[in-house]
Image (cartoon, grey):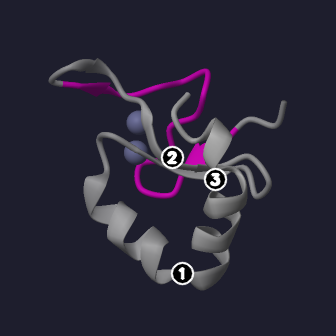
Amino acid sequence: MKEATCIGCGCTDTDACITNEGTCSWIRLSRFVGKGVCSNCEDFAEKWDDNFFLSKWTEQNKGEANV
Ligand SMILES: [Zn+2]
Ligand SMILES: [Zn+2]
């Protein structure tokens, strides 16, 4: 599976950043483009949702969105 990188802080599946709740999780994720927004970068979720292409891909990959 393609490794995803957070568009906010640049963390990845194998190099998660640490939040108050522990390691981050994906709040937006598209395996298709290999990018996501982690729980440490909630501000970027808005930017993600504003991006038609990313939000479209997220929609298509919804089943994988909560890894
Ligand atoms: Zn992040
Ligand atoms: Zn992170």
Q: Quadrant of residue 13?
A: top right
For the point 65% across and 37% down, the residue is: 64
* Numbered tag placed on residue 10 in the rendering: 2
Q: Residues within 10 Å of mark 3 (few under 14, many from 20)?
A: many
Find residue 57 and report its image quarter.
bottom right
Report how far apart the C-alphas of labels 1 and 3 lie in the structure: 13 Å
Residue at image coords 72%, 59%: 60
Q: Is mark 2 within 8 Å of ligand 1?
A: yes
Residue at 20 percent across and 20 percent down: it is 21
- Residue denoted by label 3: 35
Answer whether residue 10 is magenta in the image.
Answer: yes
Magenta span: chief secondary structure? loop
Tell me the residue that label 1 is attached to: 51
- What amino acid is found at the position of numbered circle 3 in the picture? Lys
Q: Residues within 10 Å of mark 2 (few under 14, many from 20)?
A: some
Label 1 crowding class (10 Å Cα cut-off): few <14, some 14-19, many 20+?
A: few
Ligand 1 has an atom within 8 Å of the beta carbon of the residue at disc 1: no
The residue under label 1 is which amino acid type? Asn
